[in-house]
Amino acid sequence: MRAFENNKIKMPVLKIYFKVLKKNLRAVIIYAGIFLLIAAMLTKYGNNNSNNMNFQETKTDIAFINYDGNTPITSGLKTYLSGNANFINVKDDSQSLQDALFFRRVEYIVKIPKGFTQDFLSGGSAKIDKTTIAESESSVYIDSMISRYLSTVQLFQKNIPGISQARLALLVKNNLSVKAKVTLNSYDSQANKLSIAASFFTVLVYAFMCIIFMSISSMMQIFNKSDLRRRTLSSPLRPTSMKFQLFLGHFAVTLAVWLCGMILAVWMCGTDIIGSNFALMCANSLCFAISALSLSFLIGGMVSTRGTQNAIANVLSLGMSFTSGVFVPQQYLSASLLNVAHFLPSYWYIKAVNDISGLVTFSTANLSPIIYAMLIELGFAVAFFAISLVLGKKKSSVNV
């Protein structure tokens, strides 16, 4: 029993760490809850429009001015256009029509000149006048509808000699009323969910940096208090061992935060997202969480006040997010900015997320860049931890 107790207290700093963590658990949970909720909201908002597969037909506001009277052909044209247009009453003068276009009351103005029907049916050069908003997509569709109607009229007239206008308009109406049934199906729901997961894992850079840094630096401030630090230095415990035990405690907190992030990812995307791509994203996020832990451990040892802690947390999280491709995709960032971002673990994390989201075949050639990026993230973690040990040793010798 005594031997067991002796083994149990070999890590006294870690034991004290969890006692302190228990008292500050509420603050850690608040940090995690707030920033994971922000990550979820950013993901949902960013994918709300892109993932909407619903199609909704819209109508174009047009002004229909007919100087040719209500002939069967012009009346048929207006009826045909009514399926995809809203007819707006506008006063028939140039100033009123120009104002209607300028203030977007209408997007298209149709003017049928006097004598159009007779001239058109006799093979003349009569044309329908139109005025549209520049570069309006809807005007192209209305143009195609008018062209289709007039070409159908000509087709029936040429093939049925002597046909009356009423009969001609009826045949054209029946012909153009035939529509194909269109059904929109989403055949790639898995890819859609994978895209949502990639967006969520991208935003995790911001959330993880904020949560991990705020949690770790808060704990470091307690252990860096002068009284506690002097007692530790006067004990037989080596500074390196103390640092290592603190790091283990921080790792436990980081692992808990990472697990919460993974649970939230599954909750947002559904259990069917679980697969090889998702597993790689989880492994990549764990590598980044460890590098964020080491960076927070390094900086947390030098932070002395709460205000400095909050300032550094904002600078780190936002700076790494904007320079690495979290809020702006990497392909849109300048080459000079990306060259600087190469020296940040977040850049390699985002690069791996992009590669994983587009991964179809799991060949060695496709997996190599992803594994390489993860190893670089872990390399950053080792480097940050080593620097913190060196700086901590120097700080201890100076305090002594």
Image: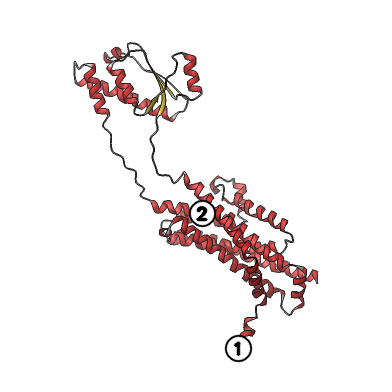
Seen from the viewer's position, the closer of residues 289 and 272 is 272
Tell me the tag on residue 1: 1
Name the front one of labels 1 and 2.
1
Q: Residue at x 64, y 75 (%)?
A: 15
Quadrant of the drawing holding the N terminus? bottom right
- Report whether 176 appears left or right of 345: left
Rendering colour mode: secondary structure
Q: Amino acid at mark 2?
A: Phe
- Report whether 66 appears left or right of 9: left
Q: Residue at x 24, y 17 (%)?
A: 165
Up/down of 298 relative to 125, above or below: below
Q: How busy is the neighbourhood of tag 1: few (under 14 within 10 Å), some, or many (20 plus)?
A: few
| Gap in angstroms between the C-alphas marked 1 and 2 | 49 Å
Q: Amino acid at mark 1?
A: Met
Q: Residue at x 51, y 24 (%)?
A: 103
Disc 2 target residue: 200
